[in-house]
Image (cartoon, rainbow, N blue to C red):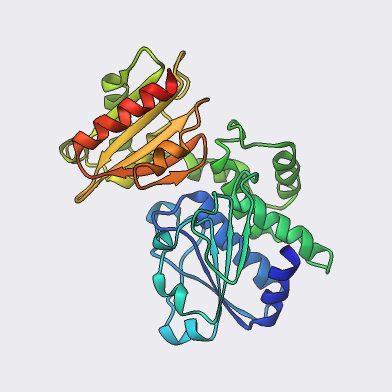
Amino acid sequence: MKKEIIDKIKKWDSIIIHRHVRPDPDAVGSQAGLKAMIQDFFPEKTILLAGVEEPSLTFMAHMDKITDEQFKRSLAIVCDTANTDRVDDQRYSQAADLIKIDHHPNNDPFGETVWVNTDASSTSEMIFELFLEMEKDGAKMNDNMARLLYAGIVADTGRFQFPNTTEKTFYYAGRLVEADFSRPDLYNYLYETSLPILRLEGYVLSELNILPSGAAYVNLPKDILSRFNVTSKEAASIVNCFSTLKGLKAWVFFVEEEDIIRVRLRSKGPEIHKLAARFNGGGHPMASGASAKDWSETDQVIKELDELCK
């Protein structure tokens, strides 16, 4: 599959790379890291990044402005995106050819070429595997590519703490840090926070609801987000702020937006992805997302999470 993807990359002069909406560091890291890798080995090609720019991740990369006409004559590659409705910039469907590269369960297959590896810690890890294949043809380590892929791996493994971290993950990280970039600077960018988010974190720690089963939940309605001057996207950054709590098995953040309530599930043992799937979502066994139409539906999520932890 990696050879097939490389053959397609060689074939096309124009390539547009996508990722999912509301991106995290792995989404941008795999997307922009792939661009850096291709551009370094094929400098004559036009490589563009699609999607709405996320201000908190501009330290990683900036997105490009792309015309409809460019899509029609390009290969599109979608990274780190399980479902078609989550692809940032739906014009990907207008591209002349389409590749999907992802580490989430392939519940929504799309694209002429599909490479999905649920055993990978991150899509950034998969992009590095693609580099290793290109290295056989003479590709060299690119400092910016290494910085981006390392950031994606670090973020999706929780700084190598999550169960998705494997021996291969550590080996790849070891290769990436051979490149010339500042890890301290990268960590500062990844984990710096603002005063409003820090204060919201204090609220979450004081309002955390813990059940005897080891399940926990936090409600963040719109008026609370407004009180702390924090967006729903920013609130998601503290979903793990109490993950070290003794006896905690799994937890859920309910973050209210204009039309839905975001359901952010995390676990230290019980597999929660099937629960997420029952509420219009999905993801990994230990980290998933879903949505609820109202607060009464969140009660059902709590009930099922409680049973799961029991």
* Residue 207 location, quadrant: top left
Residue at 65 percent across and 36 percent down: it is 165
Q: Is residue 219 visible?
A: no
Where, quadrant-wise, is the C terminus in this rendering? top left
Query: In the drawing, does residue 291 fall left or right of residue 33?
Result: left
Return the x and y of residue 203 as percentages of the image width and height.
26, 26
Q: Residue at x 35, y 28 (%)?
A: 304
Give the percent coordinates (x, y) of residue 286.
Answer: 51, 34
Q: Position of residue 132 (x, y in %)?
A: 77, 58
Q: Nearer the viewer, residue 118 or 138?
A: 118
Quarter of the figure with the N terminus: bottom right
Q: Is residue 133 above or below residue 7?
A: above
Which quarter of the figure has residue 101?
bottom right
> Which residue shows up at 45% across the image and 24% down it?
243
Q: Is residue 1 visible?
A: yes
Q: Residue 113: x and y, percent?
A: 62, 68
Question: Residue 308 lies in what quarter of the image?
Answer: top left
Q: How many marks?
A: 0
Q: Is residue 131 left or right of residue 81?
A: right
Vertical relation: 229 (above or below) 213 = below
Q: Residue at x 36, y 22 (%)?
A: 306
Relative side of 61 to 218, left or right: right
Against 57, residue 96 (above or below) is: below
Determine whether 17 is above or below 60 in the image. Answer: below
